[in-house]
Image: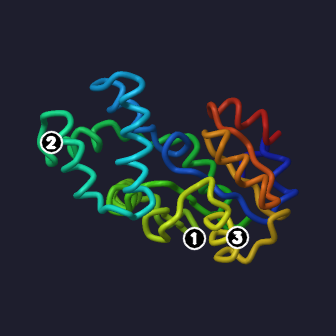
Amino acid sequence: MDARWGSIMNYKGLIFDFFGVICTEIAPFWLAERFSPEEARKIKAEIVGDADRGVISQAEMFIKLASLSGGTAERIEAEWLSLAHINRELADNIVKLKGVVRLGLLTNAPSPLVRHLLNVNGLSELFDLIVVSSEVKCAKPDRRIYEIVLGGLALAPADALMIDDNPENIKGANEVGMAGVVFASNEQLDHELA
């Protein structure tokens, strides 16, 4: 365990977001390169959001994105995978926490994408529980998804700390009684948890 993370001893569980925390964001950057800010927000909320909530499959999401961007679904999937870079420093710190606190991953994502990235990067075994929004048909900041992860880890809300790069997702965690840290960088997280 990183000695700088003294405040985690106040919690029985840490719950991490994936995209924007353990892995780089993908959809916002890919969309920003191809669409106006307004179009990108709309596509992220509607098409990517539907895939995150399991309303459409990942394959359907890539087909829809291909029809809007003029590419192919296969090419877009390859581009998305190429944008994924793991935060190895944070992953190494999470390894040190195994057995010290319960570790959860709570992510808004199409299941095949996130499961593939977790597996090929050897990250699946880091967590006691992985909750993927598309698999449970609801996404952060819906209170139900926090209740699912808390139940799966057998944690009371006050015993869990959520680490997410999206302030709205931290607000959702706060609304169910969890503490939260808005992640901006490894250095900032070290400071917050000191």
Helix, strand or loop status at disc 3: helix
Picture coordinates of residue 83 (x, y %)? 33, 36
Viewer-closest of 35 and 76: 35
Viewer-closest of 152 and 94: 152
Mark 1 vs 2: CB contact within 8 A: no
Using residue 178 as the reference point, say whether residue 90 is left or right of it. Answer: left
Q: Nearer the viewer, mark 1 or mark 2?
A: 2
Q: Amino acid at mark 1?
A: Leu
Q: Is residue 70 above or below residue 46?
A: above
Tag 1 residue: 129
In space, the residues marked 1 and 3 are separated at their CA atoms by: 10 Å
In space, the residues marked 3 and 2 are separated at their CA atoms by: 37 Å
* Quadrant placement of the C terminus: top right
Picture coordinates of residue 119 (x, y %)? 37, 61
Using residue 150 as the reference point, say whether residue 48 is left or right of it. Answer: left
Q: Amino acid at mark 2?
A: Arg
**Residue drawn at (52%, 64%), measured in percent from left and top?**
138
Q: Nearer the viewer, mark 1 or mark 3?
A: 3
Q: Is residue 1 above or below residue 43?
A: below
Tag 3 residue: 150
Residue 75 shows which numbered tag? 2
* Mark toward the start of the polypeptide (1 vs 3): 1
Mark 1 vs 3: CB contact within 8 A: no
Viewer-closest of 73 and 184: 73
Helix, strand or loop status at disc 2: helix
Q: Is residue 11 above or below residue 66?
A: below
Q: Quadrant of residue 173?
A: bottom right
Q: Quadrant of residue 117?
A: bottom left
Numbered-mark total: 3
Q: Amino acid at mark 3?
A: Leu
Using residue 135 as the reference point, say whether residue 131 is left or right of it. Answer: right
